[in-house]
Image: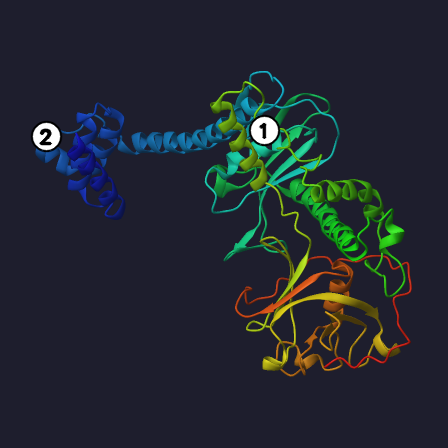
Amino acid sequence: MFEDQNDKSYLKRYVQNHPTNRMAWYLLGKQYMEEGKEAKANYCFLQSGSVYEAYERKQHELAHDPSVILEQWNKKRRISRLLIRISVASVVFLGIILAAPFGMAKDEAEQDSSKETVQVKSPAAAKNGLRVAFIKPAREKTLGNALGALLTGEGNASQTGLAVMLQQDGKWRKWTGETRILAEAKRDGKAEAAAVRLLDGQTCDCQPGNASSAFKAYSEWSREQEMRWTLASAIAHYHDRTKSWPTGMDDLTRSYPNNVLSGTSPQMKKLFPELLQAAKERRAGKPSSGDDDSHAGKAEGESSDSTSASQSTAANTSESKLSEEPLSIIVDKDSHQLAVVSGDVIVRSYTVGLGGKKTPSGQFFISEKVKNPNGRDDGEFGSRGMTLSNTLYAIHGTDEPDSIGKDESHGCVRMNKKDLEELYDLVPLGTKVEIKNDVLPGAATPAAERFRLKPVQDETNTAVVYRWLT
């Protein structure tokens, strides 16, 4: 039997690489016939054509209309692959339900092949909003994990959920790159059943639904996520600087030199209480109150199987989230790129001017942020400047835009005006900066919309004449 399995595996690989070899198709059909897999055997025999007739000394009984048979077979294979993917989602979904801390009704799934929709039983709603699960291209069962993260977990009451895959470039994921939305889970009003639309043809092996509304919703959500990254980073750095927590946005938007943030926005004001509480809980070593896996621990008397399921649930939920690490800056001296990153996600990427060996490698932090250094927005330092670790090195603008992408500075990092002003708003005072070689993708990824905050304080400093190393 072992040799037969090896023979069949070899023949399957062979016909895949040599689909016109009729003898190979005939031999593979004989293997399937010995296993009692008549349908697969007939498919192979039809492909073998005259070889079957020569060895069997008869025409195959289905040979009178092989095109119909083959089309039916291919259709079954397509449906089978789709059902497999949906089954994967259901298995992961069921596993997460079994690991949940509270009892839930048995899940019900119903496929509507014309709309590529699955009906899934979901937890009761507690609050509205869009829920987004991020999955990595290298992960197996990506659609299943994404649906599991969307449709389960304590506190999940969003009316709409999206399974999203960011563009992968080496070890990095690009926030502003080519983003794929794999699926959308949506509840109608207060109904418990969630309709899941498959939106990515590469994932579902189907005719995907129209994803325009999903992309619009994701675009709005992603703009708020950028505000979350910046505000959460500012709260963390404020605590590092003062050993205390900010009491409100006013603490983060003070005048120079305590301008942790360069401004504010209506979204930030709404997000502040939630992100402050999450920051306090992380510093205390507690899971954030919004974490779906906060109840994944083992209860008294729980079996080891339940513990394993809980751990699997936590892993799947964890990989569906974006990093909660504060924003940091990486400068790649080889590619002349500056990137704002959180974990493995490149949030923004810009082409910059450097000084070759004059630009030091190492770890720094933004120790000062100033607008219109030396009283000008069009001088040698441009309209913004960010000092690195209280040294003469800085990230600033330039009055020599042709030097961007080249090694013509005296050691500082030069940026184009619009890029610099976006970076200045995006990263707070205290942001870590690492200058190194050969770590970022070579091409800058522009954003469709610039990140901007509304200035509310004076960030100029007329008391100092700046002498950064341009």
Pick whichever, 342 or 215, lies toward us.
342
User: How many numbered tags mark residues here?
Assistant: 2
Percent x, y for residue 88? 47, 31
Residue 173, x across and y down, in percent: 57, 53
Give the x, y percent position of residue 31. 18, 31
Q: Looking at the image, which is closer to me, 354 or 448?
A: 354
Say which residue appears at 72% left-offset and 67% top-offset.
419
How busy is the neighbourhood of tag 1: few (under 14 within 10 Å), some, or many (20 plus)? some
Image location of residue 18, percent across then percent down? 23, 47
According to the picture, the residue beneath numbered tag 2 turns out to be 56
Residue 432 drawn above or below residue 465: above
Please identify, in this view, whether the residue under mark 2 or under mark 1 is nearer the observer: 1
Q: Secondary structure at mark 1?
A: loop
Q: Is there CB contact under 8 Å for labels 2 and 1? A: no
Q: Please, what is the three-letter code of the amino acid marked with disc 1?
A: Gly
Alpha-carbon span between mark 2 and mark 1: 63 Å
Mark number displayed over residue 297? 1
Identify which amino acid the numbered label 2 is placed on. Glu
Quarter holding the N terminus is top left
Residue 182 in view: no
Q: Quadrant of residue 447?
A: bottom right
- At horizontal 68% and vertical 56% (from top left) the residue drawn is 327
